[in-house]
Amino acid sequence: MPQLAFSPDLLLMLNIFFAAVIVFLERKNPGATWAWLMVVLFLPYIGFVIYLFIGLEGRKRNTFIIKSQMDRELFISYAQTAFYADKVKDIEDKYGASECVFEDSQWANFNGLVFLNFCAGLGFLCHNNRVDCYHDGNTKYEQMLKDIQSAENFIHLQYYIVRNDELGYRLIAALTKKAAEGVEVRFLVDCMGKPSGYKKMFEPLTRAGGHLDIFLPMYFIRINYRNHRKICVIDGKVGYIGGLNIGDEYLGKSKRFGNWRDAHIRIYGNSVKELNLRFIMDWNYTRAEKEQKLPLNTKYFPVIEDFDGIKMQIVSSGPDCRWPNIRDGFIKMITAARKSIYIQTPYFVPDDSIFETLKIAGLSGIDVRIMIPANPDHPFVYWAALSYLDELVAAGVKCYKYHDGFVHSKLVMIDGQVTSVGTANIDIRSFKLNFEINAFIYDKEKTAEFEKQFLEDIEHCALIDREFYDMRSNWSKVKESVSRLISPLL
């Protein structure tokens, strides 16, 4: 029987042809398409395999279209209940967004942002919130564990990464105790971020009556479409959102990074309902059996007294959303700024819209400052960030590298008035590929608190200026250029 012979040239041609066909069929943006073509050209044979694991969307569209429809229906049901019946006149007419804007003239400049976050991001403007800010993991987790110990009805947690270490076991022990007391405990962990031996680790909790689920289980290793959200809701009245995952490294115990700077908030008020709604949306998506889905009732959305507090919106985005809601919120914030824009992010790989908007702000004389870590955990992302910051420095933007450990905060602050804090980085992965959630806080006092910490962090930074770029080696320039080319894939 004759043997089929494949020459290296033929295999190379097939690799390039099929990869190019699939990339174009994916209908990605031109930058991502060219980046993938470069990968398969320069990494023959294995480039196509990399694409299969990282770039191929597969059934993503149909799967997340279904999730988007489920989320929309749940949101409409939620909004039409007594929870917000007094604020929504016509739910199908842009969700009654005209009811959710500022009447105070000093905040009227941000009505476009509020309207955008409501219409596209489905985020109600809640007026009765108290907010505590945390800048490190130790204070955040001490308070969260106290709140868990006080839980009476339910505890909902959703995290991207859970480590099999001291903090992880301490949290599981606290949850197990509450589950044994009859408190409903639900824990949703992203498949890629689950700890090794997670079934054994969570066994005490599930044996005590707690529930564990894994978001988007993988049959193959995939880094796209991960649930990057960090949510904790206790009794529907207290909630946590921010950048801190669960692990000792987030307490500053990592030998590599040491001090860990982050941003997290504790909320008491109606915005906790928005956090819980997002948890229920994601939890129900993981539940195939209808009877296992969580209902919308007053048990999970208790009445909270009305008081004049901090105004804020909870906004989600991800591959199940029609629009890149958080990214669009960032753009709206930047364009609304008149005096200052402070950004703190571990990963700075902006898309063209954010990049050009920041350049225009810098060239307009606005005080724009961007801070990234000096000790990166992803070198390619770091080199790509330096290539973008080069142009921003030329546009008058002040850029900094944080040297006192690792800065993991995801913060955008403008004019000392509005802050966005949550899970979204300033990168394409957060904007389009991962499931994210952010709080948009309209409050001068809380914004001033975050800005104060930002300015203190600058004391531990090195300025990235023209001299820095002029002194770098040719090899550094090559790394920056290559990383910039593949940045749509990072």
Image: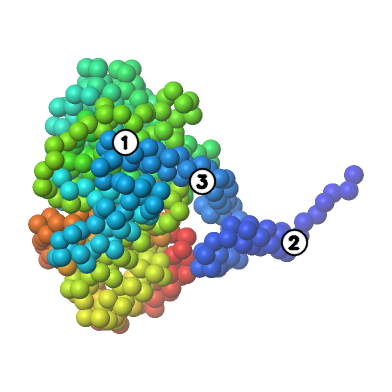
Q: Secondary structure at mark 2?
A: helix
Furthest residue in direction right, as rendered: 1
The colour mode here is: rainbow
Q: Is residue 201 above or below residue 454?
A: above
> Is residue 96 among what the camera can see?
yes
Give the amino acid at mark 1.
Thr
Q: Residues within 10 Å of mark 3 (few under 14, many from 20)?
A: some
**In the rendered image, which quarter is residue 450 located in?**
bottom left
Q: Amino acid at mark 3?
A: Ile
- Give the percent coordinates (x, y) of residue 290: 46, 26
Report the disc number at residue 81: 1
The residue under label 2 is 10
Q: CA distance from mark 2 to mark 3?
A: 38 Å
Q: Amino acid at mark 2?
A: Leu
Residue annotated with mark 3: 65
- Label 2 crowd (10 A; few <14 / some 14-19 / many >=20): few
